[in-house]
Amino acid sequence: MAPLIGRRLRKGAATTAVAAAAMAALTASQAPGFAHSDQGDRNREQRAGEAPAPDDTPIDGGSSYHTDLPPLVTPGKPGSSTDLPGLPGGGSTKAEAGIPASVLDAYKKAEAALRKSNPGCNLPWQLLAAIGKVESGQARGGNVDADGTTVSPILGPVLNGDGFALIKDTDGGAYDGDSTHDRAVGPMQFIPSTWANWGRDGNGDGEKDPNNVYDAALAAGNYLCADGRDLSVKAHLDRAILGYNHSQEYLNTVLSWFEYYKRGTHEVPDGTGVLPSGDGSGGSGSGDKGKDSGKGGGNGKDTGKDPENAHTLPKPDDEPDTSTPTPPAGENGGTPGTGTPTPKPPTTPPSTPSGTSKLTTVGAKELSATAGTDFARSPRVKAVDAAGKPVAGARVRYEILGETDSRFLGLVKSATMLTGSDGTATAPKLVAGEKTGTFTLRATAVGREAAPVEFAATVKARPVPQADALARLGDKELTAQTGASFADALTVKATSKGKATADVPVTATMITSAKDPELNDKGPYFLDDKGKPVRTLTALKTNALGQLTLPKILTDDHAGTFLLRLTAKGGAVLDIELTVTEAEAPAS
């Protein structure tokens, strides 16, 4: 595992006190993702239900990132347009809530794609926006072309072990321009080796480009959803973010922007987004190794040599700093010297769904599908409270039980879904595997005592394809000498009602004659998988084009005209003549 950066210093226009006040205000507000995060507890990841530390290199190589925090006020809230002094990016709430058009579109399209391919992940686009803000300042304020590709490269610092992890070159400099060490690349800051595994084509141009915000957003979404994660579960959300960059401060910073964006955003033209503090370069090329690459905020001199501004690797015995910034002292807290009090938490607790007391089945409890196909219907349940009223926003976990290779879309065995306003939650699309038989699907109300609901799912064997006609491709006479083999391959085509048919079982047999189709014990033959002569082959099937090319046909020492019969499932029969001549005697 590559070394990870321990303590990271905050940089930029925001003072430490203001940053601390912002984090304290978000924590005090009991916003989702903060109320139970146990920030400051160094052992939080070893506690039950929390995500353990990742076992491999983080997605961005553990390099630097922007530490600006969102404004303390809620976007779009009446009377909240006052800028707070010292906030990053000028502190304008309206400006900070703006996301460049192409970048915002990329995040939303990635969410829509994952909703289809892995609905149990429950990926919100605001999480991608939060990571994009911290990683690259939303692609340098949306500095992208019409296709969503960054106008200039966005490169992280050189991962040479000097203040950062040591990762030697894995891409020959193809993505990062460095053939000695790797650097994080693009709007979502993938290191090349990670991109090789997780790269995606998000804009349908046939390319997987980490510099394209559509490709990068979809790749990041797939990475966050890996390992069957359900991002509506706090422990899974933390694990996903820490897998991007294993730092408690990184986790806190991403969560703060995540909550901020969930409260309201708006679209702004590309190139007009708010840049993080000290970020005015618009991107760093492969030669800009002395510049801030867009991941650390700060003064543009992030060389790893200034002890006040450098990101340094922890000493061998050091633990990563997972403490939460301390709110400033003074009456009611607030920014020192300004007299501005820290906003108090809301007096009205956030609304929560009424308790689920029962789950009921909606629709059929017995489902069936043919092997290798999708089930036509997915399990569906309704959550109701003690009064029989539907419960919205309740979490329902669907699980596949029993011996089966069937899976939910995304190849997962379990998924947690949220009930809608009518109290219903539908499981992701269910895909039948090749294993036939019956298995159980169970729906459980997460965190409730309601009895689970079970569904019976049956996978039926797929029908065997049949053919009503067999025809040879080509009409060249098939001839060979004794003790040799036929040089020309024999290919046939199976059709059903005139259409080529794939996977049709075909039997090939050397017979004595059409009128007396007994197995011939002499003449042409095949070799089985052990190399022994056989005159019947049964494990033959047509390919996707309905075609079948027979294995090599050999000859013994008998000359004459022989007959090969091909019989397809469905009754189609084709007889083919094979002519064997005496081998010429060697010249004396």
Image (cartoon, rainbow, N blue to C red):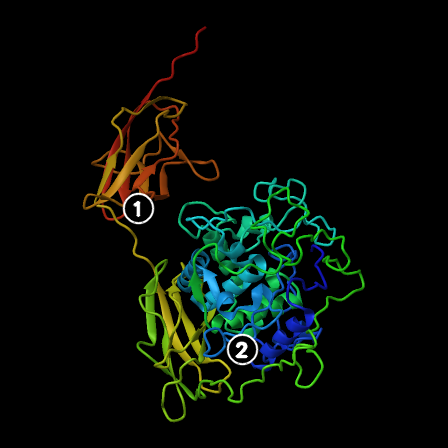
Amino acid type shown at disc 1: Ala
- Residue receiving disc 1: 502
The answer to whether 495 appears left or right of 586 in the picture is: left
Q: Is residue 489 visible?
A: yes
Q: Residue at x 55, y 61 (%)?
A: 133
Q: CA distance from mark 2 to mark 1?
A: 53 Å
Q: Quadrant of the N terminus?
A: bottom right
Please tell me in which quadrant of the rendered image residue 174 appears.
top right
The answer to whether 115 appears left or right of 514 in the picture is: right
Q: Position of residue 569 (x, y in %)?
A: 27, 48
- Residue receiving disc 2: 32
Q: Is residue 412 visible?
A: no
Vertical side of 372 occupied by 342: above or below: below
Name the outermost residue toward the top.
588
Q: Residue at x 70, y 76 (%)?
A: 326
Label 2: how many residues lie within 10 Å, few (<14), some (14-19) or many (20+)? some
Using the image as rendered, state which of residue 273 and residue 503 is in the foreground.
Answer: 273
